[in-house]
Image (cartoon, coloured by chain):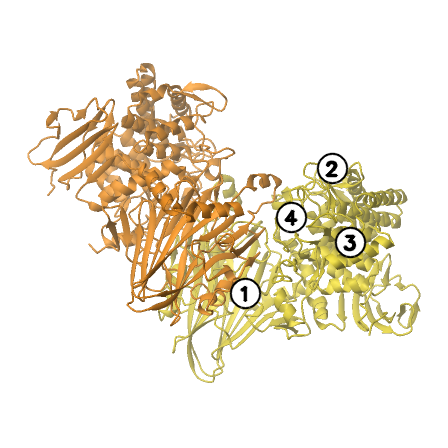
Chain colours: A orange, B yellow
Amino acid sequence: MSAAPCGFEEDGRRCVLRSPLAMPHASTFLWNRRMLLQLDCRGYATAQFMQPEPAKYAHAPALEARTFMQPEQPIYAHHPGRFCYLKDEQDGQLFSAPHAPVNRRPDTFAFSVGAGDVAWTVCCGGVEVRMSVSLPADDVAELWTIRVRNRSGRARRLSLYPYFPVGYMSWMNQSGGYRPDLGAIVCSSVTPYQKVDDWFRQRDFLDRTVLLHDREPAAWEANQAAFEGEGGLAAPDAISGRERLAGGDALYETPTAVLQYPLALAPGAEESFRFVFAPARDDAGVAALRERYLAGNGFADAVTAQAARLAGGRGCIEVQTPDPWFDAFINHWLPRQVYYHGDSNRLTTDPQTRNYLQDHMGMAYIDPRVARASLLHALSQQEPGGAMPDGILLAEGAQLKYINQVPHTDHCVWLPVFLQAYLDETGDLAVLEAGVTDREGVQATVAARIDQAMRWLLDQRDPRGLSYIAQGDWCDPMNMVGWKGRGVSGWLSLASAHALQLWSGICERAGRDAQAVEFSDGAAAFNAAVNQRLWDGDWYARGITDDDVVFGSRVDAEGRIYLNPQSWALLSGAADADRRQRLLAAVEQELVSPWGVAMLGPPYTGMREDVGRLTQKFPGSAENGAIYNHAAAFWMHALYAVGESDRAWQTLRAMLSGPDGDDCIRRGQLPVFVPNYYRGAWRLHPRTAGRSSQLFNTGTAAWMYRCTVESLFGLRGDGDGLRIAPQLPSHWSRARVVRRFRGAGFEVEIERESGLAQARVEVDGQPVADGRIAPVEAGRHYQVRVRLPEAAGAA
Amino acid sequence: MSAAPCGFEEDGRRCVLRSPLAMPHASTFLWNRRMLLQLDCRGYATAQFMQPEPAKYAHAPALEARTFMQPEQPIYAHHPGRFCYLKDEQDGQLFSAPHAPVNRRPDTFAFSVGAGDVAWTVCCGGVEVRMSVSLPADDVAELWTIRVRNRSGRARRLSLYPYFPVGYMSWMNQSGGYRPDLGAIVCSSVTPYQKVDDWFRQRDFLDRTVLLHDREPAAWEANQAAFEGEGGLAAPDAISGRERLAGGDALYETPTAVLQYPLALAPGAEESFRFVFAPARDDAGVAALRERYLAGNGFADAVTAQAARLAGGRGCIEVQTPDPWFDAFINHWLPRQVYYHGDSNRLTTDPQTRNYLQDHMGMAYIDPRVARASLLHALSQQEPGGAMPDGILLAEGAQLKYINQVPHTDHCVWLPVFLQAYLDETGDLAVLEAGVTDREGVQATVAARIDQAMRWLLDQRDPRGLSYIAQGDWCDPMNMVGWKGRGVSGWLSLASAHALQLWSGICERAGRDAQAVEFSDGAAAFNAAVNQRLWDGDWYARGITDDDVVFGSRVDAEGRIYLNPQSWALLSGAADADRRQRLLAAVEQELVSPWGVAMLGPPYTGMREDVGRLTQKFPGSAENGAIYNHAAAFWMHALYAVGESDRAWQTLRAMLSGPDGDDCIRRGQLPVFVPNYYRGAWRLHPRTAGRSSQLFNTGTAAWMYRCTVESLFGLRGDGDGLRIAPQLPSHWSRARVVRRFRGAGFEVEIERESGLAQARVEVDGQPVADGRIAPVEAGRHYQVRVRLPEAAGAA
């Protein structure tokens, strides 16, 4: 194992990368409900805020397309970012922090990522620069501190130049200039439009981008081209060629925000500066930012308030295992990511219904009230026929956009999936009787609405009893299997079976016996149809096209096997013991890689017109055969469901990089979030296999958290109790977990004991025969000891 | 007068810029009917081709918005371009040609622009690089030649690296690699989409970008990030840090095209290389490009064919005046630009109707058959009520896009405007009886359709007799004067009057007496209404808003006076002699600048909600008070119409930069096209006043050519004859013109003679009393001598 360029500090609360070269795209993100700031280790940044649709205040150098968040976004010199240049006034030497744009190799470097802040400490030629940023709890602003310290042991004359590029704001109107009255560089624009209706939508937009300072600069530049001159970003003329910035403005020219602070630093001395980088509507808005953050304790107070807000997003367990990176991730970073999803709804006004429900399934472990409200909100947009819409609208005037304009057929499935987790965690069976009024004004209970949704699934079957796929199911770009109206989805048929089973079980617990039988029968019918039509000898095929071609089967050279049907055949019980063993072996053989389990294999290398857009994606990227973690999470969940603990653990742990250095470097991502994918296609494109998408929006997070809590550590709610049944990997001999559950606390010690035939659970020293503690008493503290048998063949 | 950094060569056929620093954005463009290539002096490039909508094969580094052509496009390091690096293998020194990305100051530099080619000759440290490019006549491909010559007097070991960046092609699928079998770097992509319909629209897209070579390279690189490394574009690691390019590929990474040719050059020796840079669909398409251009004489043949095609675009006059820059522009560059518009229709599938008709008005002087066909095509899309649509669809499946989705009310005006010029130039009165079938299948003659269009204009009047403006007239962004349905346009009322007069005159000539009277009366009514409602004491106001507020008048602090109503009041005859003098003085006082006459003044500095989007544009840019040359051209035309020859000349000449060096540098554009605007707001923003938009799509070109031919040199068709009435500026004592007209040739000598009271015209030695030569005999050569009186006060 090689040494990792990154590691955890402060008991896992911070992750620190010690080189700007090893993992150049390593990144993290900060957010509040109104904005998102993604930062990479070199200072490149992507920020967006809601007004109410996502908007930017720092732009690319060319007019950018408005699009959804993309994986593996390319970085280039003029990509938006937050930088500062440091010039030695004596010898003219230049470096920049964090690293770009000068890219001078630092003496020391640290990119230190916390839950609510990011800090870089960079030392070059004896000058140490520390840049750090936090967001306020509920405002669109970046709060920056830049500190320069002389570590060279001799007096230094320097100039510090914070450089916050603003980019190409607008073809209608853009400008920039220094405003001494506001203490800021103010860049103004008009969001481009052509239709009169847009004026009324946009008139209150925050079309200015400002860099406010707490200390008056000696000089400034607001004109990007004048700043760069012939030297470009690596050696801007305005810095290399002049003593002072020229004080230029941008007049329908690309603006920028650069300030200059000449410093004379004795050995050991340091100077500190604070800045606010934010959008604003007008002078009053700029002045308000100053008043709020640069007067009194505003800056520090905002940081404190945001920290408090984030503390509300802590998870329901703290763990201690033989894997410290895993511990750090589970204790701090994964619940943070789960909270991010539920808190921000991915900063979109129309999250996909399946994402919304799964994100809030995760929220059940963080803040169940939010999860509950989200279920009710989603159901309020149920269509009269029982179908769930493609996206859930969150804002006044929001519309279904992008992929939500393409009809998908799986959205109802996620209602029972959500509910199972929510009810297990909360015991809130009363939610079933909550009333929900839809857009037509029809009132119905949650239970009645889910009945309808399940009947819609049952209704959308073809004569073979399989689910129509229309233009996609969970797999968005599988858009041409059934676009003519006949193609069916094997996965969706199995997922429907599982959803119906879950709902049947909930109905049973709620005393709705007729429905329990109805939906249990429905599930069986789905399973039977899949077993009849789609079992291919070693695995389940993915579906049948409009033209009656079974695909995702052994006859296919590409896309031979898809992971999802296997996972959900385990969950739905479609696979009997023999089929289970066969499909486990097939997945092992065809899909498991060192970086996790791929979604399909082999990846498609060209368009397959009866499968669709999926097959046009780059082989090994995204749905076309990546280690698509959301699908891997279903597999993990299914493996735990059938007791395949070691395989499940391998799948789980592969979602997280490290601690091996080569693994970190190959994935290129810090272990502070699970990405939506790692590159697959390890046979076809070994160079890029394992590389992270760097995209932190993913349904994976909720599943990873759920499986860790409920399956790996086996601490799952069950009716009025907590069921304790850990499935530790066989090479772990012990683990400790603190579990918060319905107001009670559980301190759980798990260890393996030789000679045990089966697990034994003791609570407060008393054995619990079935491992179920019930009823759980809020406020009580439970000491739980779990003894597990030695694993067969384990050390 | 300071020396200009640029000048004409080869009798005006080439324009050469001798510095990469003086006018960094100076550019030119090449085109054929399928593609457009805009190149600046530093090598940055914007290319598009039609499939059938505009598409790109070299992209920005981030996902770009799809938009219409923008003025003053920002350049940045990773902007698309065509470059080569030259490395001295002995000392490692690096430079790039044309200038970027290294930006090393060259010893000599020439950016030489011709009608069908662009060539740079750059010498750095004794190494001369010549890059040149042409397009084929009817194919999407760039044909590049790069020649390296050793001018240092000593043997040199060098490496040449052609660098043709490809940019961020697609989030769905992008890659790049070297294909020895095709002799090319091939970058592949899938144009991103989400809806199944788009697959069928896009399946045949040319989604590859290829760089084909004629000489096998020693090495290559197809991965942008690997190429740059830490050194960035100014000193790429792949060049500075290695002997040979690494042969890398791009796998869902930003691709690029870089080749390496090691050269050992004796003193005076040179090596030459040819490349084809183009989009392609597949291997066969790439192979076809090679076969077509890199086998046999394909390359040279294509250049010859394109030259022949461009020769078909020559104008109808050649001139020799006291102003050699003007001569070069009129003899070569202005007709080229007019031809570009008529030939390419601005590379859009839905040109605005007013642009389409005015562009083809210009085509009447180049290729009248095309102009005629375009009139008939436009009329075939006339709406049943007589209105003309906002845009004319040119391709199967094309749709009205962008501004064409906003209702404008002026399109009918341009029919008689077009026809007057077309008939004067051709005498083709028979066109009036040509039949045109519209989309409803209704057949009607051109004359009947124009009657309908004129009646539609008469119908669209408010109770005051003024024209409703809806969401804009000629001025696209004046979208909120009348969006509630009541506001009226003073300009459109006057333009309607003029159009009706023109049509009335044509009807009269065609023996359609009743219509002649009908439309003449209509014109008079428009003029009367404008005079009653909109004369403001010193000029005509621009209109009256929905809320009954007259604007563009003395009570306004911003937008006090608009140019267009003044121009068209002269053309329509609304202004009597007194008003004419007053408005001339007002324009002189309020709108005339050293760089031409502004479209309005003072520019708006903030949204005026009852005028609209226009007022949000940056002050002095585009319609908000720029020297908007299309409007200035109307003014020029009007000035000639009322005999204001000197003012007209000043307006005309101000559209063209130089020969003063300061003027060239300020405008920043080569005098090879007239741009759509020069920055105005010279009082508010003196630093940027006069700067060119660099946008060569403009209705100005046709008007500038028409006025030069028909008014400045006074060689206008008139019925079956040619009317000769030059309006030379008073400081010109002579000029010579060769005029081609209806198959005849006219050699015209114009000179001033003291003591003359009025102009005298002689043809072949015989005086022509009214200056009208009729009938003109095709095939005949006329010698014309024009003597003009000395101008009052002229030297």
Co-location on one chain, circles 3 and 2? yes
Q: Quadrant of the C terminus of chain B?
A: bottom right
Co-location on one chain, circles 4 and 1? yes
Task: State which tag comes first along the sequence, 4 or 3.
Answer: 3
Horizontal relation, residue A760 to residue B284: left or right: left
Q: What residue type is labelled 2?
A: Pro
Q: Residue A667 placed where, x, y %?
A: 30, 51
- Mark 4 or 1: in front is 4
What distance separates the C-alpha of mark 4 from that of mark 1? 41 Å
Q: Which amino acid does label 3 sit on?
A: Ser
Mark 3 nearby-residue class (10 Å; few <14, some 14–19, many ≥20): many
Task: State which tag comes first along the sequence, 1 or 3.
Answer: 1
Query: Label for residue B614?
Result: 4
Mark 1 belongs to chain: B
Q: At numbered mark 3, what does the secondary structure look like: helix, strand or loop?
A: helix
Quarter assignment of residue B305: bottom right
Mark 2 belongs to chain: B
Query: Label for residue B567?
Result: 3
- Mark 3 or 2: in front is 3
What distance separates the C-alpha of mark 3 from that of mark 2? 31 Å
Query: Label for residue B143?
Result: 1
**Is A777 located above or below residue B220 in the figure?**
above
**Is A665 located above or below residue B442 in the figure?**
below
Q: At numbered mark 1, what does the secondary structure look like: helix, strand or loop?
A: strand
Which residue is painted at 23% across and 44% down in the image? A326
Residue lying furthest bottom: B153
Looking at the picture, tell me which residue is in the foreground, B319 or A708.
Answer: A708
Query: Label for residue B384?
Result: 2
Task: State which tag comes first along the sequence, 3 or 2.
Answer: 2
Mark 1 nearby-residue class (10 Å; few <14, some 14–19, many ≥20): many
- Asked if the residue at tag 2 contacts the one at tag 1, i.e. Cβ–Cβ closer than 8 Å, the answer is no
User: Looking at the image, can residue A1 be seen?
Assistant: yes
